[in-house]
Amino acid sequence: MKGEKGKKPKNEFLYFAWRNWKLRLGLAIVLFFVVLAIVGPRLTPHQPWAYVGPPARPPSKEFWFGTTMFGQDVFTQFVYGLYPVFLVGALGGGLATLIGTAIGFTAGYRGGWVDEILNTFTNVVLVIPTLALLLIIAAYLGVRSFFIQAVFIGCTAWPWTARAVRAQTLSLKAREFVDLARISAARPTKIILTEIAPNMLSYLVMVFILQFGGAILNAATLDFIGLGPTRGISLGLMMQMALLWGALPLGLWWWFVPPGLAIALLVGALYITNVGLDEIFNPKLREM
Amino acid sequence: MQRYLAQKLTIYILTFFLAVTIDWIIPRFMPGNPVQTMLSRAALRAEAVEVMRGYYLRAFGLDVPVWQQYLNFWKAVFHGDLGVSVYLFPKPVIRVIAEAIPYTLAILVPAIVLSWIAGNKFGAFAARRRWLDNTVLPLGYFLTATPYMWLGILLAWGFGVGLGWFPIAGGYSFAMTPHLSWKFVLDLLWHWFLPFVSLFLVMFGGWAIGMRNMIIYELEADYVQYLESLGAPRKLIRRYAFRNAVLPQITGLALQIGTIAAGAVVTETVFSYPGIGKLLVEAIQNQDYFLIQGCFLFIIIGVLLANLIVDIAYLIVDPRTRRGMVGEI
């Protein structure tokens, strides 16, 4: 297996990656928002909650995205709100992927009663509506931070990953190279990490991307209901403020369109990147 | 078949048990004391505070040992006695919830069923048709990536505020009182439309994409290549591929129910639609603990029932599960 890891497959991967418009489009959009999240706060002289201009102004040269009911600059709120999106997405999505793969590997590889217990547990958590659970927990927590939000999202979003990884592990476990490793008395952890995981790497990357997008959507929902972090600004919070303070009847579209559009574009771009990767990893799916 | 159903039912009973336990634990073991919060909000005189504290302790049943509290909670759940709402005092929680349930079901059930059917049909149609596929795919992903509340806000803004075709808040006009007449029913439908469409569209994108991806996998399968080599018509092949691809979509529906319930919560909030979701958010904002517990309990029951219905549907659609050939979906 290792001998093939020369120069050729890598080039082939890059070649197909570049030819795939889905991957290019998805990555371009994601990259755009990453750059905006980094550079944005430096482009604006204001602070997100500061009252800096006349209230309820449409976009202009001075206020690129207009101002809120209270005269806060929407562009400033928007670019500051992008950072927590990536934070919660990476942390929450990463944690969910980690827990899901750990449980999936263990259940699939160990089998027997360990599998029974872990699988039942996974199925139970799978059925519980996690967002309702998050709502309840967030409601009772007085002070909340982006970090806590990400951890909670990560701890509730893993079940489908665990199920999928378990199924894949079950099929990989029966392969000859795993038998060989077992005969040579390798420890289970080592077999999982060096024999099974590398064969699922492409799949795990895609799982992480999906979990990343899911965490962003979950966080936006929590923020929108007013159960987001108690300090700071986020895109979900912007939408909540807009709805709460009558942006709808007053027609202040510049207040609620950018945050939702950014989330939809970003998560949509992640999904499309995923399809692109799938086509690269799985040659059968490539367009002729 | 019995094995399959028994397995599923065990999971659901376990889940219900766990969920009720969580429902009981959370207000008791979270940082911050709900009773203290309610007392400080009431801003009473010192001697009144003591009386109120005693009242609340008894009302929550906090004056007995913990294990007794837990058993009492189960007893209350089975008697449908979920306490009295503080926010809508003195209405019992169970009645508040009973009034909200029809609204939630009215937007959720049609949105789920119709979007699933339409999305599957459309996704199957678009798969491997170059032009359609390349335009539908990004659009579908954009739709399914759209936060539910944002689409709701956009629809309310466009069709409610901008064009003025639909109302943007409430389950029926404020001037009306609920009664049985054509006028009232039409008014209900008029208010129902936008929240329904909002939920429908987001889910539609997801199902269309899911089906499209499944069909593409199926069209690579051996049986399809065999049929092709026999010279079977394309339409027939696609029909077989569809029948196989529908199965994972049914499983997908079961996986999605929790997310859909969350979508309903925010959609109801956007449109001030008087369902369970809006009730839950109001209960949270007003720290009405009995109402929060009640809403959570009913969301759990709804999700479990929906899962059970999907399981039974799967049993009907896939004969292999009935013969016990596959253990699990």
Image: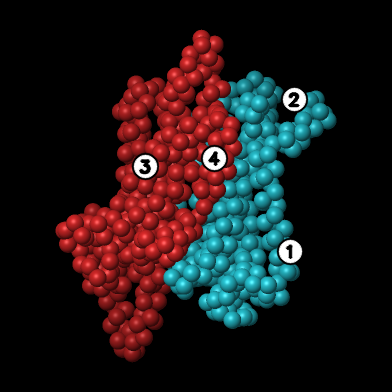
Chain colours: A cyan, B red
Q: Nearer the viewer, residue A184 or B98?
A: B98
Q: Nearer the viewer, mark 2 or mark 3?
A: 3
* Discs 2 and 4 carry the same chain letter: no
- Looking at the image, which residue is at 48% across and 31% down? B125
Give residue A17's quadrant in the image.
top right
From mark 4 to mark 1, how far is it between C-alphas? 33 Å
The reply to whether discs 2 and 1 touch (Cβ–Cβ < 8 Å) is no
Label 1 crowd (10 A; few <14 / some 14-19 / many >=20):
few
The reply, left or right, for residue A94 in relation to residue B112 is right
Q: Position of residue A248 (x, y in %)?
A: 46, 68
Which chain does the numbered disc 1 sit on? A
Secondary structure at badge 4 equals helix
The label number, if any, that marks residue A1 in the structure image: 2
* Discs 4 and 1 carry the same chain letter: no
The label number, if any, that marks residue B125 in the structure image: none
The reply, left or right, for residue B322 in relation to residue A122 is left
From mark 2 to mark 3, how far is it between C-alphas? 48 Å
Which chain does the numbered disc 3 sit on? B
Residue at image mark 3 = B114
The reply to whether discs 4 and 1 touch (Cβ–Cβ < 8 Å) is no
